[in-house]
Image (spheres, rainbow, N blue to C red):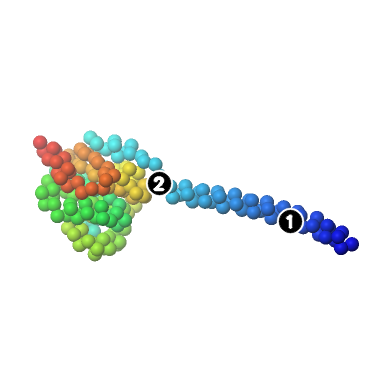
Amino acid sequence: MILAAIVIGMAINRPNAGSNQSNNSNNSKVLSQNAGSTDDHHKPQPVDSAVFNNLQGKPAPDFNLEAYDGKEYKLSDLKGQNVLLFFNEGLMCYPACWNQIAAFGKDKELADKAVVLNITADPKNQWKEAVTKMPELSPATVLFDSNRAVSNAYGVLKLESSMHRGQFPGHTYVLIDKEGVVRFIKDDVQMAVRNKELLEEINKLSS
């Protein structure tokens, strides 16, 4: 009778064991699927330079952005002057982007020949952290494109230099002549300080 009870007990418990195995298997599949979707979320978006490459030789998209000092800059109001835009990753891009912004701020020769505007997607209220850490940033004109509308218009969010592709610009230059036409573009994956090269490009506009 004892042996019969054991056999009956095993028979009763067997379906539950099978059900547990099935549940475990299903749970593993769900976890695997969730992990896959998380991985996809963190994968960088593919490079897309179509909009950016199409800028050259065409009127630059107009914009109106606020600077760190509170002044507003409207691109169309700057006609009659060469304008150099530096789209960058801002706070997260230390020291490369910071070094370029600081170099622009102290370059009087460049400032005499072009209005240099540094554009970041950072919120304005966070930029104080950068200025506190590197006071050399203070003389530079930094504009805030927090909703990324201007960065999208110029196609700089999905270029090779962006470390957070689709979310932030990387290290990208756009040179606009006195008529408001884009004359030079460069996406710099090396993230260097390019003052000398950019000055040469500006000089070409007046030759």
Name the quadrant of the C terminus.
Answer: top left
Foreground residue, 139 or 3? 3
* Alpha carbon separation for disc pair 1 and 2: 44 Å
Q: Amino acid at mark 2?
A: Pro
Q: Is residue 24 left or right of residue 189?
A: right
Label 1 vs 2, first from the N-terminus: 1
Residue 17 x %, y %: 72, 55
Name the quadrant of the N terminus.
Answer: bottom right
Q: Amino acid at mark 1?
A: Asn
Residue 6 x %, y %: 83, 60
Foreground residue, 8 or 113? 8
List the residue tagged with mark 2: 44
Foreground residue, 38 or 203? 38
List the residue tagged with mark 1: 16
Which quadrant of the view contains residue 124? bottom left
Q: Can you name the residue that lies furthest to the bottom here?
A: 132
